[in-house]
Amino acid sequence: MEANEWESVLQHASDSVRAWGGARPAKRAAALGRVADTLDRHADELVGIAAREVGLPEDRLRAELRRTTFQLRECAREVAEGHCLELVVDHADRHWPSGPRPDLRRTMVPLGPVVVFGASAFPFSASVAGRDTASALAAGCSVVFKAHPAHPGLSDRTAELVRQALREAGAPKGVFDVVHGERSGRELLLDPRVKAVAFTGSASVGKQLLALAVSREEPIPFFGGFGGINPVFVTRCAAARRGTEIAEGFVGALTAEGGQLCTKPGALVVPATSVLTAVAADTARRRGGSPLFDKRFAERYQREVAVLREHPDVTTLVAGEPTADGHSPTLLLTTAAAVVRSPDLLAECFGPLGLVVHYDTEDELLAVARALPGQLTTAVQGENCDEVLLDLLPELVERSGRVVWNDWPNELAVTPAMQHGGPYPASTAPQRTALGRGAIARFQRPVAFQGFPRHLLPEGLREENPLNLPRLVDL
């Protein structure tokens, strides 16, 4: 992209925010719905392009595209219903207990132009029209999408369809556009017109971008998702009662979609005397290969596996290898004491690699939990008779965005109660979610209007509430 084109994209994004953010909720909702419908109509074409550019099976790609359009529609519903505006009206009250209260009316407004960095391993759901783009547009922000070089053709075609749908819905020119990597993400992030950034990807790259975002003369919000190892803690009672079932379930969850999910359970913390380790190893040996995203991903995965296998406190249970179908799973073994000494053993590895962690006492189980950095998810395979749960659960809540009971964390339901995000370094905004309707709030800020006449107020704050939006009044 030439310098003048890059400049044009940023300027159009800046110019369009006021009209887009000031549009009635119904108009923004209709535009998002139109984008979803357009992508659905072109599903065969888009999946075909994706299949040529990335090493993912067609069923995975179709499922991911369905999730993407559902997220768009969920954001559209939230905008249409008006909940994301969080409207509050406090009428003047000279007898208010803390002192006379003026007429105050509060709403949410868009932050401004947002830069979204595309993720390589999720060519639909964390890409051009994915969750960050959907929620930023729903908030009333314009979006400049930084395409990932892993799927340039898919990015361009998806962007073309998004622009077409927005244009047909009457959105202003420049409310959405895509740029490629001829110029660096650093320049995008430092441009003073940009007011927020969303990023999904590796912690090493994300931390560099985060440092830039907060070092600007005007620091801006950086909504980064870096993932984690998402460990599963198996209690002694659960291991005794359901050991075989848990071990087989773990390997299935570990290898789902080639282990290339940010919510993949990458570690299993188990009693050293249980059958789980042997059953898990036997199950992993019988698993076939799974395709990895692309050659670059496969090379990085092999390097990370090699580093872990060489660690002095790690034993190889199952040595996975490249096959005609992809990579078969690798299963490693270590101890709770080793994890406490070397927390780097709990680093995320994208691919079909699992780490079994042996503990001898409940104190060691708790020590592993306390050694965890922030996680998107943690899970417990337990029974009601487990007394350790009263101590374990508070530790996991402190370190997790989502805690799972007797299940596996892979699936991310696009629903209001879902929390996708967690304490740093899992994400940089643990108070927000990157998925579902709640993701819109990341790209808004509150503004209160004091004492204004009716005709100067946003419609949702006018006394007669002409759009019939939900409000809190004089609570």
Image (tube, rainbow, N blue to C red):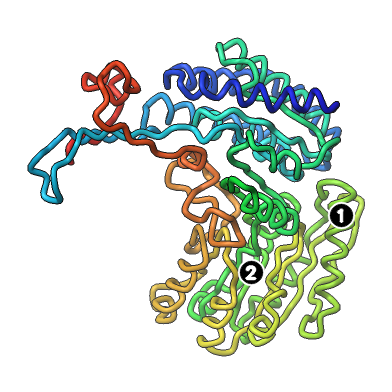
Q: Mark 1 points at which residue?
A: 298
The type of residue carrying mark 1 is: Ala
Q: Name the residue under label 2.
A: 247
Instruction: Classify residue 282 as left or right of residue 234.
Output: right
Instruction: Classify residue 54 as left or right of residue 237.
Output: right
Compare marks 2 and 1 and give the one earlier in the sequence.
Answer: 2
Measured along the vertical axis of the image, is residue 80 above or below residue 207?
A: above
Mark 2–mark 1 Cα distance, whole angstroms, equals 26 Å
Q: Which of 247 and 255 is in front in this view?
A: 255
Residue sitting at x 12%, y 38%: 93
Residue 273 percent across, percent down from the top left: 62, 86
Q: Quadrant of the N terminus?
A: top right
Say few, some or many: other residues with alpha carbon within 10 Å of mark 1 (under 14 / 14 to 19 / 20 or more). some
Instruction: Classify residue 457 as left or right of residue 344.
Output: left
Residue sitting at x 67%, y 18%: 163
Measured along the vertical axis of the image, is residue 325 above or below residue 251?
A: above
Residue 393 percent across, percent down from the top left: 44, 71
Residue sitting at x 51%, y 86%: 362
Instruction: Classify residue 188 as left or right of residue 152.
Output: left
Most distant residue in the left direction? 95
Say few, some or many: other residues with alpha carbon within 10 Å of mark 2 (under 14 / 14 to 19 / 20 or more). many
The type of residue carrying mark 2 is: Ala
Q: Say if mark 2 contacts mark 1, CB within 8 Å.
A: no
Q: Which of 45 and 463 is in front in this view?
A: 463
Q: Nearer the viewer, residue 472 or 342?
A: 472
Q: In which quarter of the image is the C terminus?
A: top left
